[in-house]
Image: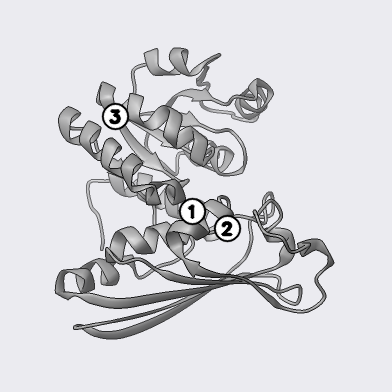
């Protein structure tokens, strides 16, 4: 399988290293980042694979590939994913929060259905997605998510609170997922994953807590199937505390599943 990579920062670099270390059986054909220096640095750090560096997205699009991985931003999803799907290139999306813009979601679904390309969404910082998808077939009545993070993991969020000065835990957001992903575009992709899996709007609480050093996600689901509660306490990525370490490996695991002949779960 020939891979293309959009975004050469934390997540993109981890993916490229997994290919370089032959953890993923694929060819990294091309990489692209709007900041060209990031792509150049990433390529220099690879030992076994030497992907082409695309100088523009148009050049990226010209390179033959089977799957393009977005590891950049919500804006990258809006700008690039429809064009890739239209061309028939399957995609894996990390900035999944943007898909709660349902007009965009419907649009990219149409491109995928027309071209036959696939859209893959990693599970991210949480698990239990298989159970939630199964429960959605029976009927989910309610789903609630509480996110607790250190303020340094929330820097850049569109909130009024001065997060860097907090001394005690504080509820900084309570509402629904569709709004949360706009206010916290780099922090709560799990909201979108839960929404898409459950087919229900998710009630969200976000707590900035200077006393924790982990990213905590706890959700409760109720429906005709019964109830389920799951809690995940994740180590932040050393390179970017906004991202849970496990979220990066959920992408790597997804690509291993795509390339492997045997899939478990």
Q: Determine the CA span between mark 1 and mark 2.
A: 7 Å
Q: Is residue 11 above or below residue 7?
A: below
Circle 2 or circle 3, nearest the eye: 3
Residue, disc 2: 245
Residue under the image location 47 percent in, 46 percent down: 95
Near mark 2 (Cα within 10 A), the count class, few <14, some 14-19 or many ≥20, is: many
- Mark closer to the chain start, 1 or 3: 3
Q: Determine the CA span between mark 1 and mark 3.
A: 24 Å
Residue under the image location 55 percent in, 50 percent down: 185
Q: Is residue 231 above or below residue 172?
A: below
Q: Determine the CA span between mark 2 and mark 3.
A: 28 Å
Residue ranking furthest to the bottom: 226
Q: Position of residue 107 (x, y in %)?
A: 28, 36
Residue, disc 3: 85
Q: Tell me the SS state at disc 1.
A: helix
Q: Is residue 201 left or right of residue 145?
A: left
> From this viewpoint, is residue 258 visible?
yes
Q: Position of residue 117 (x, y in %)?
A: 23, 33
Q: Label for residue 249?
A: 1
Q: Quick check: marks 1 and 3 in contact, CB under 8 Å?
A: no
Residue under the image location 49 percent in, 69 percent down: 175
Residue situated in front as seen by the camera: 254 or 181: 181
> From this viewpoint, is residue 259 visible?
no
Q: Tell me the SS state at disc 3.
A: helix
């Amino acid at each position: 399988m020939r891979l293309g990579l959009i975004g050469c920062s934390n997540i993109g670099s981890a993916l490229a290293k997994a290919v370089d270390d032959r953890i993923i059986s694929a060819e990294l054909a091309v990489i692209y980042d709007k900041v060209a220096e990031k792509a150049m640095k990433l390529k220099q750090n690879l030992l076994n694979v030497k992907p082409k560096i695309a100088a523009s997205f148009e050049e990226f699009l010209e390179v033959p590939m089977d799957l393009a991985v977005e590891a950049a931003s919500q804006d990258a999803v809006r700008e690039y994913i429809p064009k890739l799907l239209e061309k028939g290139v399957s995609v894996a999306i990390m900035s999944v929060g943007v898909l709660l813009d349902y007009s965009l979601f419907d649009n990219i679904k149409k491109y995928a259905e027309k071209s036959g390309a696939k859209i893959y969404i990693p599970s991210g910082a949480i698990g239990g997605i298989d159970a939630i998808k199964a429960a959605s077939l029976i009927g989910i009545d309610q789903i609630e998510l509480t996110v607790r993070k250190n303020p340094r993991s929330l820097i850049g969020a569109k909130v009024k609170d001065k997060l860097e000065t907090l001394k005690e835990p504080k509820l900084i957001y309570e509402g629904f997922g569709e709004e949360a992903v706009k206010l916290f575009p780099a922090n709560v992709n799990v909201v979108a994953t839960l929404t898409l899996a459950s087919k229900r709007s998710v009630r969200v609480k976000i707590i900035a807590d200077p006393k924790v050093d982990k990213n905590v996600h706890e959700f409760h689901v109720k429906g005709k199937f019964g109830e389920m509660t799951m809690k995940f306490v994740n180590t932040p990525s050393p390179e970017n505390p906004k991202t849970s370490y496990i979220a990066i490996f959920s992408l790597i695991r997804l690509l291993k599943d795509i390339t492997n002949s045997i899939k478990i779960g």
